Image: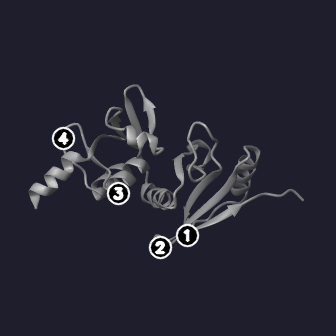
Amino acid sequence: MKRENAQAAKQLTTAKLTPQGAVISLAEASLLKKSGYGGVEGDFLTLTRVETLYLLDRGKIRVVDEQGKEYSLKELVDFYAKYDKDIWLKHLVYSDLRKRGYIVKQGFREEGIEFRVYRKGAEVGKEAAKYLVVGIAEGTILDVSELQSLAERAQKAGKELILAVIDRQGEITYYDVSWTHL
């Protein structure tokens, strides 16, 4: 059994851990790149934290640090939580959208937008994102003026704002948010 696990681990694409996510040599990452993951930087495909978590969780990659230590999903979540306390909630939203067939890219953090979401089957780089997604935990107080600002920015950009509300069981409900001036 250990031998089978060791062989399976060798066949997985190896991603090198970084505080921002992980990097994979382009030579090993062509299928991931075609599937809409990461961004190319030099000779590497750079994955975000949520992409790295998702791919590890789905058994598509193995994640190792500079010393060669391999990370489990829990260890990786704990590592990333040092940099982003909401990483688990973001992982839940990202994973749910990916499982539904959407291409999901990092949003505009400084503007409060967590993800840019492309229509199913879209080619990233050739088409614009259709949705901007913001995730919040159920029970979180959200300022109406902040929601208005997000909705107005989305409308100006020609995109739909989606609010992803994550309940205590990890279930996600999506709300389409629009703003109308009276």
Q: According to the image, label 3 marks what residue? A: 58
Task: Determine whether the residue tagged by mark 1 lies in a helix, strand or loop.
Answer: loop
Q: According to the image, label 2 marks what residue? A: 168
Q: Give how far across and how far down residue 91 sits, in percent.
A: 44, 57
Determine crowd level at label 3: few under 14, some 14-19, many 20+ residues with C-alpha closer than 10 A: few
Q: Nearer the viewer, residue 55 or 71?
A: 55
Q: Nearer the viewer, residue 138 or 31?
A: 31
Q: According to the image, label 1 marks what residue? A: 138
Amino acid bearing label 3 = Arg
Task: Determine whether the residue tagged by mark 2 lies in a helix, strand or loop.
Answer: loop
Query: In which quadrant will I find the N terminus?
Result: bottom left
Q: Evaluate if marks 1 and 3 touch, with contact meaning CB atoms under 8 Å apart.
A: no
Indicate which disc, 1 or 3, sits on the residue closer to the N terminus: 3
- Closer to the observer: label 2 or label 3? 3
Indicate which disc, 4 or 3, sits on the residue closer to the N terminus: 3
Q: Give how far across and how far down residue 177 sits, in percent.
A: 71, 60
Task: Determine whether the residue tagged by mark 4 lies in a helix, strand or loop.
Answer: loop
Question: Is 6 situated left or right of 27 in this image?
Answer: left
